[in-house]
Amino acid sequence: MKLVLLGPPGAGKGTQAAMLVERFAIPQISTGDMLRAAVREQTAMGIKAKEYMDAGGLVPDEVVIGIVRERLQLKDCKDGFILDGFPRTVPQADALQQTLADLGKDLDAVISLQVDIEALVERLTGRRSCADCGKGYHIKFDPPTTADICDACSGKLIQRDDDQEATIRNRMAVYHEQTAPLEDYYQQAKLLKSVDGMADISVVQEQILGILQAD
Ligand code: AP5
Ligand code: MG
Ligand code: ZN
């Protein structure tokens, strides 16, 4: 299964992708997670990318396209993958199509998570993730058993640098300008499936599974 999860910051792409990974044993390819790893490791690319990420802007297309192109060629993608946060611009979507064509593959679906803007801000300001294993939480909607401690590994829960309100506003604006046009792009390609992302996490997952079964 070859999927793209599309949606604004905080829509639930990472949350839903992690659940799909468990069920289907295919990798989640999150460009945001890969870029944050490069920032932590202080690679040359990570140091440059951090400037864009902290401002809530997009990292240049050629950088992310290169990362995804390499990632899709790894063996674990042979039975499918879930792209989370890529593509985010029309040139990225074109590059994805080209890369998949080169690999003799095709997307099965692009799932677009629809969430109201006020809900997005609440989700992002309340989001926490484990510093050790990366597992995601929300202080209100998906809290850990013990405050600030990861259920899976007892690691400390932290907040993302770009989850500050001013940065969140920029990320939203960038989404509307540069990423929202991909809805039309994938509608025209007859791949777009919209899901009500306002529902509870498990209900959103059920909707996605329903779409995948019908495909
Ligand atoms: P990225 O990491 O991709 O961030 P994003 O797109 O802004 O999305 P988020 O990760 O913030 O949200 P999500 O949809 O994954 O929501 P989540 O599941 O965590 O990108 C970060 C930055 O990297 C970008 O700004 C850019 O600079 C750069 N970048 C990345 N990819 C790039 C690309 N392709 N090109 C250029 N630059 C790129 O959920 C959010 C919270 O809500 C969680 O706490 C969760 O528990 C909770 N939640 C989830 N679902 C529900 C629900 N149904 N009900 C209630 N709460 C819920
Ligand atoms: Mg995410
Ligand atoms: Zn953990």
Image (cartoon, rainbow, N blue to C red):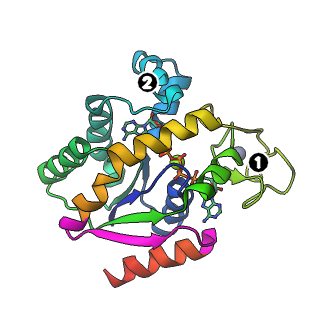
Name the residue tied to disc 2.
Answer: 49
Q: How many tags in the picture?
A: 2
**Residue 78 is at least partly visible in this image:** no
C-alpha separation, residue under disc 2 versus residue under disc 1:
28 Å
Mark 2 or mark 1, whichever is nearer to me: 2
Q: Which mark is residue 46?
A: none
Q: Residues within 10 Å of mark 1 (few under 14, many from 20)?
A: many
Residue at 45% over, 42% down: 173
Residue at 39% over, 71% down: 194
Q: Position of residue 181 (x, y in %)?
A: 29, 53
Q: Is residue 5 above or below residue 87?
A: below
**Residue 191 is at least partly visible in this image:** yes
Residue 153, magenta (yes or no):
no
Q: Position of residue 206 (x, y in %)?
A: 53, 78
Element type at marker 1?
loop
Residue at 51% over, 48% down: 9
Circle nearer the N terminus (2, 1): 2
Q: Residues within 10 Å of mark 2 (few under 14, many from 20)?
A: many
Q: Which mark is residue 150?
A: 1
Q: Is mark 2 within 8 Å of ligand 1?
A: yes
Q: Amino acid at mark 1?
A: Cys
Quadrant in the rendering for residue 57: top left
Q: Residue 94 or 209: which is nearer the viewer?
A: 94
Q: Amino acid at mark 2?
A: Ala
| Quadrant of the snapshot with the C terminus | bottom left
Q: Is residue 108 above or below residue 185?
A: below
| Quadrant of the snapshot with the N terminus | bottom left
Quadrant in the rendering for residue 61: top left
Q: Is mark 1 within 8 Å of ligand 3?
A: yes
Residue 190, magenta (yes or no):
yes
Q: Which residues are magenta?
A: 187-202
Q: Residue 162 or 65: which is nearer the viewer?
A: 162
